[in-house]
Amino acid sequence: MVLSLIGVYCGEQVAIVLSGRQAGKKVVVIKQLDEGTKERPYPHAIVAGIERYPLKVTKRMGAKKLAKRSKVKPFIKVINYSHLFPTRYTLELEGLKGSVATETFKEPSQREDAKKVVKKQLEERYTSGKNKWFFQALRVRLPELSFERSHELTSLVQQF
């Protein structure tokens, strides 16, 4: 069974990266290429996400420490649709479509400039207090096995 994800992603849609270096990170879809291109003949999207999330801040912290802990490390990447998990959320970031395009990835200096623009936009959004959920790392809860349960499972595995 082949699941078609074409048309699921729209501009400014939030998704989660499923595999690779940024697995588990939240991203914003900047541009979707459903038909693919000559270099990449599969459906993919240009995304911008957060590689390093901002740290927790409290009221007691000074302005200097608050500014340092509120920094965001962004990344921009071209990702196959099969490596993205769409969410129902959107994040409106003005000016990202113009700063990040397909040509951005050809030259390293253009890529760095685009990352700076994305970083500025994300930090402005974080300091304004909007979309707090986007700036928190994804929480994964794994079921804990009790000693008895894990002992039962190991004995079952040893029997086979």
Image (cartoon, rainbow, N blue to C red):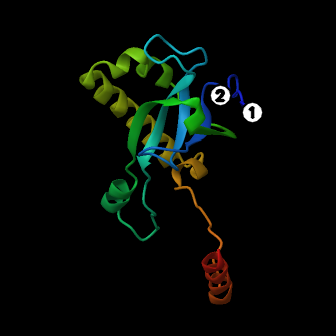
User: In the visual, does 104 lie left or right of 22?
Assistant: left
Outermost bottom residue: 148
> Residue 15 versus residue 66: which sits nearer the camera?
15
Q: Secondary structure at mark 1?
A: loop
Label 1 crowd (10 A; few <14 / some 14-19 / many >=20): few
What residue appears at the point 62 percent right and 68 percent down from the top-left corner? 142
Q: Nearer the viewer, residue 47 or 147?
A: 147
Q: CA distance from mark 1 to mark 2?
A: 20 Å
Q: Which residue is mark 1?
A: 1
Whether the residues at callouts 1 and 2 have beta carbons within 8 Å, the answer is no
Mark seen at residue 115: none
Tell me where residue 127 appears, x and y as whole percent: 48, 48
Q: Amino acid at mark 2?
A: Tyr
Q: Is residue 136 above or below residue 116?
A: below
Residue at horizontal 24 percent and vertical 24 percent from the top: 109
On screen, 89 above or below 143? above
Say which mark, if any, is on residue 9.
2
The picture places residue 96, in percent across and down from the top left corner, at 48, 25
Q: Secondary structure at mark 2?
A: loop
Q: Is 28 left or right of 143, judged from the image as shown?
A: left
